[in-house]
Amino acid sequence: MKKRAVYPGSFDPITNGHVDIIQRGLKIFDELVIAVLKNPKKDTLFSSDERVDMIRTIFKETPGVSVTAFHGLLTDFARKNEANVVIRGLRAISDFEYEFQMALMNRKLHPEMETFFLMPNLKYSFLSSNLVKEVFSLRGCLEGLVPAQVETRLRDKFPHKTGLAVKD
Amino acid sequence: MKKRAVYPGSFDPITNGHVDIIQRGLKIFDELVIAVLKNPKKDTLFSSDERVDMIRTIFKETPGVSVTAFHGLLTDFARKNEANVVIRGLRAISDFEYEFQMALMNRKLHPEMETFFLMPNLKYSFLSSNLVKEVFSLRGCLEGLVPAQVETRLRDKFPHKTGLAVKD
Amino acid sequence: MKKRAVYPGSFDPITNGHVDIIQRGLKIFDELVIAVLKNPKKDTLFSSDERVDMIRTIFKETPGVSVTAFHGLLTDFARKNEANVVIRGLRAISDFEYEFQMALMNRKLHPEMETFFLMPNLKYSFLSSNLVKEVFSLRGCLEGLVPAQVETRLRDKFPHKTGLAVKD
Amino acid sequence: MKKRAVYPGSFDPITNGHVDIIQRGLKIFDELVIAVLKNPKKDTLFSSDERVDMIRTIFKETPGVSVTAFHGLLTDFARKNEANVVIRGLRAISDFEYEFQMALMNRKLHPEMETFFLMPNLKYSFLSSNLVKEVFSLRGCLEGLVPAQVETRLRDKFPHKTGLAVKD
Amino acid sequence: MKKRAVYPGSFDPITNGHVDIIQRGLKIFDELVIAVLKNPKKDTLFSSDERVDMIRTIFKETPGVSVTAFHGLLTDFARKNEANVVIRGLRAISDFEYEFQMALMNRKLHPEMETFFLMPNLKYSFLSSNLVKEVFSLRGCLEGLVPAQVETRLRDKFPHKTGLAVKD
Amino acid sequence: MKKRAVYPGSFDPITNGHVDIIQRGLKIFDELVIAVLKNPKKDTLFSSDERVDMIRTIFKETPGVSVTAFHGLLTDFARKNEANVVIRGLRAISDFEYEFQMALMNRKLHPEMETFFLMPNLKYSFLSSNLVKEVFSLRGCLEGLVPAQVETRLRDKFPHKTGLAVKD
């Protein structure tokens, strides 16, 4: 039987850290459903259609990867997609507690669904979509941080942008 | 002499984790003053009156529990209520650092006031008011997460709501 | 050769914890450039001019301290100021992970720049600009938390202010 | 193709937390090789033969589970067993950093091997073999903490034992 | 009714951090039973009799404090002493996870017993009995770290001692 | 004036992570005194003479680096060497709390001495002398983990060694 897992996220935009997790997940799972969260409340840089499109382009040659936008409970999405595993990256420098909280709530809502945590490559351990957006908005170099297509899209869509927050 | 403690929070809405902490606190303290924060800046789902009312309903048969809305410094509230103890739940999966920071600032503002930390039941260790609101907004089941009255109020007040943020 | 380091932050407003880090940094570095972040996106209490001015007043008698507003990448600012060291305070009760993430991203953007972490005095380990603003807004005493000039400015600028968020 | 993973540990003795992780792992992997560390340096309560035997007894009716003692590098063991996945439990209250350190070293030694982290049931989040031994040595009740066979073995082997360390 | 709590530990030796926790505990509890762990397995610097004696001397004028050596399960000790509360200090820089693990195991063994966590004064947040012993063994000054009696006892018992471990 | 810092540790043996910290430290400090702890209590693989000798060999061409064995309080050593700065590496995956505890105790013993924390290269963030010894003892490849000289010394001194502890 084919093993299928869901990899949920905002992917706004997808980073090399996400790509790395997908590639690691494919060692174990025959099919990965990349679930792109449509979030009406959260302000995203790219629309869910754009985010789905970018990820599809990146993995268009990779068998076993499908990309879908979703809205609602992740547990409902997993049920509908007949997947009882969710994978999540766990960065060495990361919101461990947030991930555990979500995984435990999901277990409460859907006890048969399991969350598997994978470590991305160390070199992506500081990487997040938010940090990518901040560096981009300050005209920093994104090389090695996002796939080439993502950088192109960012430059196309936002010829100039500003505003990096340094916590005080 | 009667021992009195203050249990402050937003309680927007009160969860079973909060209820559990209150019950544990009552083993030690003769009187618990539930202090419901009126926060003009923070957007709450329920008004402070509604939040006070829900908690009062839940504990109307429990001697020793009183519920009050408050605004201002917690240390001033504690002084006015002649309580020199604050209790706070500390979840295994929790913002430990936030709690310590607040407790230390409160100690600076009111050196005689002591903060006592209690662990809720493990089964509530992933629970927060925010997570409850998110699950509710996505039409997830709240059974076991909040008192029945709270679920009823949520369904009455918000026939349909959307928008769960998954951190990317 | 003179050793120069950059100390970046929002400083909205500068606290005694920041002052303490600056004084510790001056034991090692001959020159400290206090880099005040102009952040168009983040809502600050004081304008960057006001923040620069407050810090200059505090250190006007301290040789080796200069204060500059900046916008853009910290790494670009450091290059322009011919400094290859950034110092950051690391509080015992602190966002360790945030600091590491920023430092690693900065290392990616500018491999020759080094981030040095210093511990402030323990008595400031719970202190942050945000907490200062919250206490002030609730009319709490700021003694020992900020330099006298900062308290004066706060009282001058905001005769009355409200709204402290207690996380639930 | 069958998916095989290795679950390494000292299992001195196996606890209900370990059993829980094995059961969760079997949702994904067709075969789990329980790798019982023979550790000449570390003082174990049960010999590796005894530990292997206990685990075999517990899973004798569970298809897909095999139990082997091993010595040496885990990465060599995984290679020899043609498994490129290791699973490890990650408790909410746990040595996260130790697990990450080991997983990263293993990735250095064997880049194709992946470590997957699973969360045990919350009710086992405080459980460890060491704590089981300590509670047993102080004649505490082990019900719910270890499989029945393990408790029997402990009582058979050690009619009376003492010495629980409380950190000061 | 009198409120009684147990404060367990090795107290080898008692530090000013422990003394601080006892004084804070006495604001809430009418009686504190200091439970000095007799640990046959763990190598202590002072015998349990010496440790009990030191603490008794320090608190001989403090009403409500009693000191007892104990061996076995803390939960059994608490039952025998008719106390259903345990207090533990939680240092800002501390083994939070260890404390939670112990508290959760104790809750499993004795569901009616509650653990309350108190923060010591910030100035003791780095202090532990082990660190005191290490500093002493290297002839460092113990002023402000332990009660005067403890320093005297250390100097009487160990005219010269060596061996501080710096982790590499 | 020349800036001098002390870099203390057991260095049993020195790893590439230590070497990396030394190189980063040399960007700021004109002189680094590598202080090799002679620890009569702690069982080391290499004698302090051997450890000093290995480090001297590695840095024999690097101006500004001196290597000394020391015993006693680090603060006394720093005073004697006229250095008022200690540097320590802080790994992303690291005993942050241990480092803070030691730094705070050192500040208590010698208020003028400052501890500066530096991040090693991410690729060394999981590396420690203990892990190196464990991998070596299990005949694992040390390439990239320690300087070539260290690997040679290990192989010369210990033709075969066993015993890696996996925490259960």
Image (spheres, coloured by chain):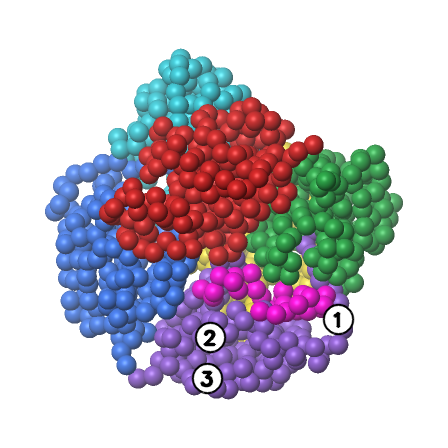
Chain colours: A yellow, B green, C purple, D cyan, E red, F blue
In-image side of D49 versus D135 (left or right): left
In space, the residues marked 1 and 2 are separated at their CA atoms by 29 Å
Mark 3 is surrounded, within 10 Å at the Cα level, by few (under 14), some (14 to 19) or many (20 or more) other residues, namely few
Image coords of residue B134 (percent x, y): 72, 49
Please identify the quarter of the rendering in which residue B64 is found: top right
The answer for which chain carries disc 1 is C
In space, the residues marked 3 and 2 are separated at their CA atoms by 10 Å
For badge 1, the amino acid type reads Lys
Image height of F142 relative to C137, above or below: above
Q: Residue at x 34, y 56 (%)?
A: E141
In-image side of C1 versus A79 (left or right): left
Magenta region? C119-144
The residue tagged 2 is C22
Query: Residue B9: within the magenta?
Result: no
* Near-viewer residue (F59 or A155): F59
Pair 3/2: label in front: 3
Q: Residue at x 49, y 22 (%)?
A: D140
